[in-house]
């Protein structure tokens, strides 16, 4: 039997029960997003400020579609993180299959964007339109991460609806989530932190 991930996986409970995942209770399991990072350059900060301003400008006209989220937010972040040049390669709408032989089920889906270094998955991106809670993308991203060929190495994902960003780490059927980074935080532009984390993942931290 073949089933779409978007139909079968709608909650963390679904992904945990269907794929045998569990969330880590160890605060050190997902340290990669909590490190002290090198400061961004002034140009990077200025660019991220413009990206944030542009997104909020377009959002003022109404709901931002998934395609617009990818154009306004995901693509510029991938560029600034240097994921669009060697040694990385980018795949869009990558088809994945997750086989559950015990239940005779094949789960099918498509990854919005996938950054690779050779055959290794560096980071998977799952985006939703702004009217969706970004948390709806977390279970689906976890399901796609199971298809990673990274072996015992961790796999990372970034989920976003344009307004909010969250990172995921999966390793040996154990996962954890980062904080929620919001564009609506008044005290700072949280895209700074998002870019710092993406860049660190690119150099293998």
Image (cartoon, helix red, strand yellow):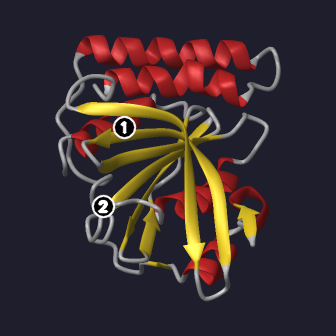
Q: Quadrant of the N terminus?
A: bottom right
Give the Cα separation between the discs numbered 2 and 1.
Answer: 25 Å
Of pointers 2 and 1, the one earlier in the residue sequence: 2
Q: Residue at x 54, y 30 (%)?
A: 186
Mark linked to residue 41: none
* SS assignment at label 1: helix
Q: Is residue 10 visible?
A: no
- Foreground: 192 or 85? 85
Residue occupied by mark 1: 193
**Placement of 199 over or under 32, stated as above or below:** above
Q: Residue at x 29, y 48 (%)?
A: 119
Name which quarter of the figure residue 5 lies in. Answer: bottom right
The x and y percentages for residue 127 are 61, 39
The x and y percentages for residue 177 are 47, 62
Q: Is residue 69 rendered to the left or right of residue 114?
A: right
**Placement of 19 over or under 57, stated as above or below:** below
Residue occupied by mark 2: 150
The x and y percentages for residue 45 are 34, 18
- Foreground: 28 or 80? 80
Q: Residue at x 22, y 18 (%)?
A: 41
* SS assignment at label 2: loop
Crowding near the residue tagged with mark 1, few <14, some 14–19, many ≥20 C-alpha atoms within 10 Å: some
Furthest residue to the bottom?
Answer: 102
């Amino acid at each position: 039997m073949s089933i779409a991930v978007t139909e079968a996986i709608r909650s963390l409970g679904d992904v945990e029960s269907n794929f045998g995942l569990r969330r880590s209770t160890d605060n050190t399991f997902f340290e990669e997003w909590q490190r002290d990072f090198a400061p961004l350059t002034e140009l990077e900060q200025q660019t991220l400020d413009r990206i944030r301003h542009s997104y909020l400008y377009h959002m003022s006209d109404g709901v931002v579609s998934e395609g617009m989220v990818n154009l306004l937010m995901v693509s510029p972040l991938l560029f600034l993180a240097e994921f669009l040049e060697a040694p990385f390669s980018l795949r869009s709408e990558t088809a994945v299959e997750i086989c559950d032989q015990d239940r005779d089920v094949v789960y099918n889906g498509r990854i919005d964007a996938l950054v690779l270094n050779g055959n290794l998955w560096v980071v998977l991106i799952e985006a939703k339109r702004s009217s969706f809670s970004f948390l709806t993308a977390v279970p689906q991203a976890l399901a796609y991460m199971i298809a990673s060929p990274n072996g015992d190495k961790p796999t990372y994902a970034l989920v976003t609806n344009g307004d909010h960003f969250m990172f995921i780490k999966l390793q040996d059927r154990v996962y954890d989530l980062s904080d929620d980074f919001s564009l609506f935080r008044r005290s700072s532009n949280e895209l700074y932190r998002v870019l710092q984390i993406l860049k660190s993942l690119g150099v293998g931290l």
